[in-house]
Amino acid sequence: MSGEILSDRLAKAVSRAEADAPFLRRLLRARPQVVEALAASGFAGALAGRVRADPADPAFAGALRRERQDVALTVALADLAGETFEATTRALSDFADDALDRAIEAAMRERMEGAPHRGLVALALGKQGSRELNYSSDIDPILLFDPATLPHRAREEPVEAAVRIARRVVELLQQQTADGFVLRVDLRLRPAAEATPLAVPIDAAIQHYESSALPWERAAFIRARVAAGDRDVGQGFLDHIRPFVWRRALDFGTIAEIRGLSRRIRAHHARGQRLGPGYDLKRGRGGIREIEFFTQIHQLIHGGRLPAVRAPATLDALAALADAGLVPPDEAAALADAYRLLRMVEHRLQMVEDRQTHSLPKEEDALDAVARLAGEADGAALLARLEPVIERVGDLYDSLDADGGAQAAPSDVAIDLSAFSNDARAEARIAAWRDGHVRATRSAAARDALGAVLPALVAALARAPDPDVALARFDALVERLPTALNLFRLLEARPGLLDQLAAILSHAPALAEELSRRAGLLDGLIDATAFDPPPAVPDLAAAFAQGDRDDYQALLDHVRVAVGERRFQLGVQLVAGGADPLAVAEGYSRVAEAAVQVMASAAVADFARAHGHVPGGELVILALGRLGGGRLTHASDLDLVYLFTGDFLAESDGPRPLGATTYFNRLAQRVTAALSVQTPAGPLYPVDTRLRPSGGQGLLAVSVDSFARYQAESAWTWEHRALTRARPIFGSPAARAAAAAVIADTLARPRDRAALRADAVKMRADIAVHKPPAGPFDVKLADGGLVDAEFAVHLLQLAEKVGIDPHLNVAARALEEAGLLAPGFAAALDLLTRLLVTLRLVSLDSTVPPASVREVVAHACRQPDWPRLARAYDDARALIGGEWRRVAGIG
């Protein structure tokens, strides 16, 4: 050792390697400089200081094999000396990437000296993809090439060149010589491996994954990354197929496929299932593969919605799932500890003879040797250490598939139809599904999936408050689907959704209609977070903006899908989760505000590509009405006013310049269209801009200065009343502040109280004539309803300059505390708001709600039953109506 003093841990590691690992013993004899480097420089220094094989060297293949010996011995001794599992597997994986990259370069150099190293990429999958390689892992790359950029010889097709390069890469890495080999290479994970060349054209690979890939291929790409070769080509490919891997509308067939694969592995390796000599650490019950499958199943379920859980490495993914509340922390910790232990023992097995083995030796002496390498006295001690760990892993994995995959055929299960008023009609509907008489169940796979879930589905519909309505709406949902396969698989995999679905179908026609258009909305309910209030506006906006910002139309679709899911979740929180309608209304408002911010930002950027920017000017958006007040309903439109800052005589600086007024009016039209035009992903929000200066006859967007002059000189009382609920929701802080100052100055102006009162009384009377109440539960327009409450509050705000706040409930409480409104007014306002938000989901015609939903409405309004709610509603209207008349001086 050249006189170097070895550390105690390194000396013990060398001793254990000499005694029990023949492969390492041979390397110690052949590569003594490795121990010297470790002693002098430590693990990282020894790796960094190794002699690297040069792809330009004619003797590259032999040099790379000797380099591999150095890396293998360095990592093994560091591991035996106590280096972490994560560090050792990362080092092995980094070497694999580097060796693969240099092999590609060498293969290209051999064919065309001086040719650029581009056009061919190696994607790492499996343990290389997750940077968790073991000592004797093979690597499972997918080799793809771009025919347009791959160097090739004259009169040679790009595919011929790619295949020849691929063969040479495999030979450089895998061929056994006197110096051993570098890496075993398995190319069978490439798309349609039985029919495709060793290197696959990039377009053909994209077509495969978008059209005909099998479920297990999705799971394989959880751990895919660019490892070697042309990284731009590889990253572009992974970006393109990301939606294939991380689907927001989850195909639970993939989950079933992974579970089925696990069962087949258990059956095939039955002899290695039971702990003892011969136990298969990788495939056995409670082994490495089941930890990985457990993790990947959760990633596939949640990763389409939560990018944070997409980590390729098993330990990182478990930590992310625990942080997100998707796996209990104690389970994640137990699986992580088990993974480290099982992988450590696996490494000790492979140190012995550099064999790709995962099974404990059956011979006692050999098992004892592995145990000593693992720090145990003998084989019995090692088995005792493993036993509780693999039992816990096996139990946790079994909990994902408690029934073992057995499913009863539809004919095996009796279905009780007694809850339906006409069981013959119910039976006919169900028979149409079973027999494939509707488009959604024409495929055998869809009918099989229906059979698996049908008894539980019918039972859930029968438990609904109105089983007939629930069944009819579910039938309408099925009839509108191109295929119900994924819906049935989802309901089978998440039986807890069945009662939520029944509640939606029974209570909420608005949600049932949305579900019939997009059954994938149910996917959004599989996370517990679906029943949390939406986060703050900036967080929502960041989530909505995760689409392709460079593709304007794609972003429009992405935001519509994301907003639709959030709004659907909020509706379900109310009708099935018991959420407070006030909190739901505030959630609707935050979602809409975030959507405005993202859509406006996208429209501004897209518009600027053609017309540039107006120097010193920017768009400002005011929210009025229910959005300004921060409490929307499921059916609300958005009342918006567009302003702009800067000089209205200025001109934009783009390729097609426009004057400021024209520029911002066209931009405002673009924003309105972004929010309101229906795209293939569906609608977003209706937008109402009639509250702008001069109403429908005025410009769509005016300067902040013009807006201030208009409010000071020309606006009507009703326009100032509308401003009491106005607040800026888009624009820079300075621009918002300028608009907010105009609003504050306008509302602070002194007023003729008599004239103000007369104007308010006339406005309310005009509304009563042109918009009479549609029914006794027209909560807005009925006498003493929300319109009367708003008029009372706004009149006092303008007259008394008290409670100037766009949020109606905040203003009402301030006025009540100042003695300007009767005690209980704010509580009455909250009751009517709760009732409005709830009825917009369950009873759209403003009549008395159907008997089947009255208890839901009462519960939402925090009343014990319907009769008590009806009395409370009458009392609230009486109080509010009386206050309006008192404040207005009428009656």
Image: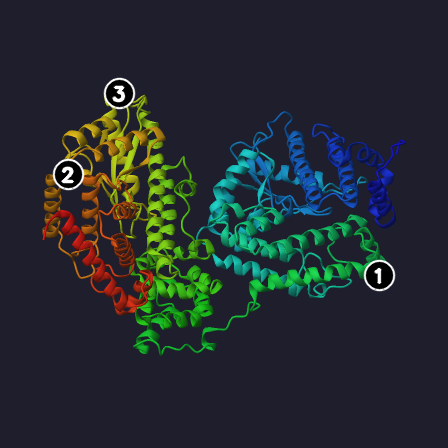
Q: Amino acid at mark 2?
A: Thr
Question: In the image, 83: left or right of 449?
Answer: right
Location of residue 543 with respect to 826 vertically, above or below: above
Along the viewing direction, whichever of 138 and 275 lies nearer the viewer: 275
Marks 3 and 1, how far apart in space?
Answer: 89 Å
The residue identified by callout 1 is: 364
- Depth-wise, is mark 3 or mark 1 nearer the camera? 3
The residue identified by callout 3 is: 650
Q: Where residue 211 appears, x then y in whole percent? A: 46, 50
Crowd class of label 3 (few under 14; some 14 to 19; many from 20; radius 10 Å): some
Along the viewing direction, whichever of 436 and 343 lies nearer the viewer: 343
Choose the circle earlier in sequence order: 3 or 1.
Answer: 1
Choose the circle earlier in sequence order: 2 or 1.
Answer: 1
Q: Amino acid at mark 1?
A: Glu
Question: In the image, 53: left or right of 536?
Answer: right
Q: Determine contact: label 2, label 1, CB under 8 Å.
A: no
- Depth-wise, is mark 2 or mark 1 nearer the camera? 2
Point 72% across, 29% down: residue: 54
Element type at mark 2:
helix
Residue 380: image quadrant is: bottom right
Crowd class of label 1 (few under 14; some 14 to 19; many from 20; radius 10 Å): few
Q: Where residue 275 appears, x then y in whole percent? A: 73, 64
Location of residue 447 with respect to 819 vertically, above or below: below
Residue 717's disc number? 2
Is residue 75 visible in the rendered image? The answer is: yes
Along the viewing direction, whichever of 620 and 405 lies nearer the viewer: 620
Q: Amino acid at mark 3?
A: Ala
Point 62% across, 49% down: residue: 315
Q: Where residue 407 appears, x then y in whole percent? A: 51, 70
Location of residue 709 with respect to 298 vertically, above or below: above
* Image quarter (top left, top right, bottom left or bottom right) of the N terminus: top right
